[in-house]
Amino acid sequence: MEYRQLGATKLMVSEIGMGCEGFSEDDFSMAKGLFDAAEKSGVNYFDLYASDPKVRAAVGEALLGRREKFIVQGHICSVWQEGQYKRSRILAEVQEGFEEMLRLLQTDYIDVGMIHYCDSMGDWETICKGGVLQYVLGLKEQGRIRHIGLSSHNPEVALAAVASGYIEVLMFSVNPCYDLQPADEDVNELWNVEKYKNPLVNMEPLRQELYETCQRQGVGITVMKAFGGGDLLDEKLSPARKALTVCQCLHYALTRPAVATVLAGAHSLEQFAECLSYEDASEEEKDYASAFAAFPNISWQGHCMYCSHCAPCPQKIDVASVTKFLNLAVAQKEIPETVREHYELLERHAGECIQCGACEKRCPFQVPIIDNMKRAKEIFGK
């Protein structure tokens, strides 16, 4: 495993890290398996944006006896209320969520306290003036977090945060699709079809400026969505009209300025092993130039990334999971038994959707969620 310094921090992080998407698999038992594989392979960095207490508890159990072997990037402002994820800027909720995270992780500090999901300038101002930033600074002064981070999809907001001097680590979405798009406070504009009518050439300048500014100012970047929610690995969905490989996607992200680690959101040990194979891959296997040279005009509008920004649902439907199982069923052209079983285990099902549209207003990717819920009901029967 290769290690990189995380910006100006003294942390040396594995260039392949772990996202938290797989920690809830197999009734949360996957967490321990992933941490076992990470320790064996030298992965020492992971992200925990999930606020579900069951996920946090599973991670806490997986860390027992080896806490000092891992660098924790834990999200502040990601809270759990009434059985659902919520992004909050309400200070009391933020404080309660942080204390719960420490308790369930069975630790007294977080290495990187990540201010969760800021995509608009107005939200950044709220963070700065509404008490959240002051609270986070206090946590750092107390030693309860060691470094301050922020997660964003918007290069303009990310640049403002980096320029503030407070942010030491930036969690940012890096892949060859996002990097073609200009900044916008409405993340939906990443998928505006008008922007794909003319050829998109080279990286969008503001994104390049962000990466270079982070490099200059010693702000380390931890990468999310390197595979575009898996679409870049699918021949039918890839903008290159052929599947990119895991190694190509990882290499693209790792060759951006200031990038220290790519957080692999593996849902299984097999997927995690595939990401780890990057360390032994040849330069030819890592090379993405030929694939990128074949990029046509592209659009990623309407593809669910399972990011859970659609939550909270007033009916308490786990929209992202329903959509995931729907897509799995559609992709297989039949319903695999395991998919049906996992769908059955959901506490709420697609048929309970009241079509209020709240999820679609929050979706960063203009996914037709209501239509998906109708189709899931037809396929799964409830």
Image: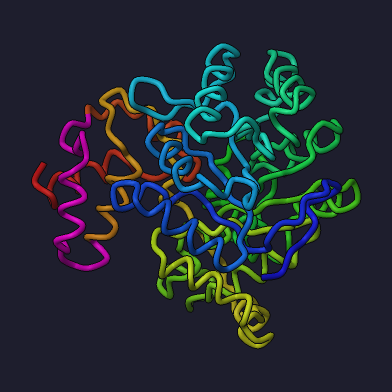
The answer to whether residue 24 is above or below residue 94 is below
| 309 with respect to 355 (left or right) | right
Q: Say which residue appears at 70% left-offset and 18% top-offset.
A: 135
Kindly tell me whether residue 41 is visible in this rendering: yes
Figure check: 56 above or below 47: above
Magenta-drawn segment: 330-353
Identify the residue at image location x=74%, y=67%: 255
Answer above or below: position of 167 versus 9: above
Colouring style: rainbow
Name the residue rendered at 71%, 69% in the picture.
Answer: 2
Q: Residue 112, how many percent across, how many down?
A: 69, 39
Name the chief secondary structure element in magenta: helix
Q: Quadrant of residue 320?
A: top left
Residue 314 position, x and y percent, is: 30, 22
Which of 354/335 is in front? 335
Please name the residue shown 54% across and 42% down the image. Answer: 48
Q: Is residue 7 left or right of residue 22?
A: right
Q: Is residue 250 left or right of residue 13?
A: left
